[in-house]
Image (cartoon, grey):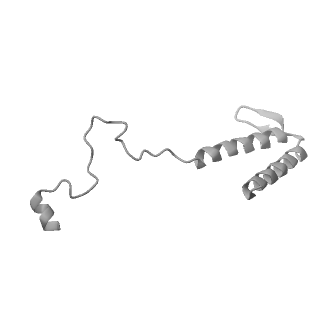
Amino acid sequence: MRAKTIFIIIVTIVMTVFLMINTDAVEFDFIFGTAQISKLLVVGLCTFIGFILGYVAGRPRTVISTYDDKFPDQEKVSSSPKDGLSDEDREYIS
């Protein structure tokens, strides 16, 4: 097994043990009132939301490297800075 897989298994085991230890109910204050909720539910929900947000923030973004395929009817932009120069200017630069 790779180190990443072993790390994920260890974190999952530690998180499960932590959640199972904290099963007692505590009083939580919400905006509109209070409620008795299990610590297991609160910590588990916060962990799940954290994993989802971490995945969304860390996933690779789609990068469009060229627009040639999407817009075939537009003229292509030159990739060389010398393409827009006159013959006289090209001779001067060379």
Side of 52 where 92 appears, left or right? left
Side of 58 where 88 appears, left or right? left
**Residue 59: x, y in percent?**
58, 47
Which residue shows up at 49% across the image and 44% down it? 62
Which residue shows up at 80% across the image and 51% down it? 9
Which residue shows up at 42% across the image and 44% down it? 64
Quadrant in which the N terminus appears? bottom right
Which residue shows up at 79% across the image and 44% down it? 43
Which is more toward the observer, 19 or 35?
A: 19
Corner quadrant of residue 74? top left
**Residue 38: x, y in percent?**
85, 38
Extreme residue toward the top, this view: 32
**Residue 72: x, y in percent?**
31, 36
Which is more toward the observer, 16 or 87?
A: 87
Quadrant in which the C terminus appears? bottom left
Corner quadrant of residue 37? top right
Side of 24 where 58 appears, left or right? left
